[in-house]
Amino acid sequence: MNDYKSIWTSTTVWGGIVALLAGIAAIFGVTFTEADQATLTEALLGISSAIGGIVAIWGRIRATKQIGK
């Protein structure tokens, strides 16, 4: 497999982050169901994709050189 993707586009990474945060929250008495964790993971993936798009567009607008060969 030679296809790569950013760590931030990995559902596994986001799921791990959500599980970690849910574990920390449980220490403080806050509980999440598995469905809540799945929903939060999907929301974070959507947010990170949107932020990536905004950064890409902003970078192109601020660029001082043309795209070319």
Image (cartoon, rainbow, N blue to C red):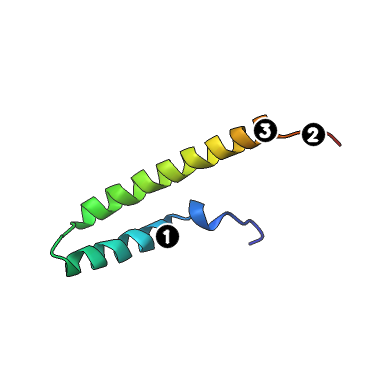
Q: Residue furthest bottom?
A: 27
Q: Nearer the viewer, residue 58 or 68?
A: 58
Q: Is residue 23 above or below residue 52?
A: below
Mark number for residue 42?
none
Q: Residue at x 30, y 49 (%)?
A: 40
Q: Residue at x 35, y 46 (%)?
A: 42
Q: Quadrant of the N terminus?
A: bottom right
Q: CA distance from mark 1 to mark 3?
A: 33 Å
Horizontal relation, residue 37 to residue 63: left or right: left
Which mark is drawn over residue 65?
Answer: 2
In terms of sequence position, does the residue under pointer 1 or pointer 3 come before the other?
1
In the picture of the structure, the residue carrying the numbered disc 1 is 12
Measuring from the top left, give residue 61's x and y in whole percent.
66, 29
Type of the residue with mark 1: Thr
Nearer the observer: mark 1 or 2; the answer is 2
The residue singled out by tag 3 in the image is 62
Q: Position of residue 56 (x, y in %)?
A: 60, 38
Q: Quadrant of residue 20?
A: bottom left
Question: Which of 30 and 5 lies nearest the eye of the viewer?
Answer: 30
Task: Identify which residue is drawn at 43% across, 55% down.
Answer: 11
Number of other residues with Cα within 10 Å of mark 3, as a class: few under 14, some 14 to 19, many 20 or more? few
- Type of amino acid at the residue the image marks with label 3: Arg
Q: Are marks 2 and 3 in contact (CB under 8 Å)?
A: no
Location of residue 27 in the rendering, given as x and y in whole percent from the top left corner: 18, 70
Callout 1: helix, strand or loop? Answer: helix
Q: CA–CA distance between discs 2 and 3? A: 9 Å
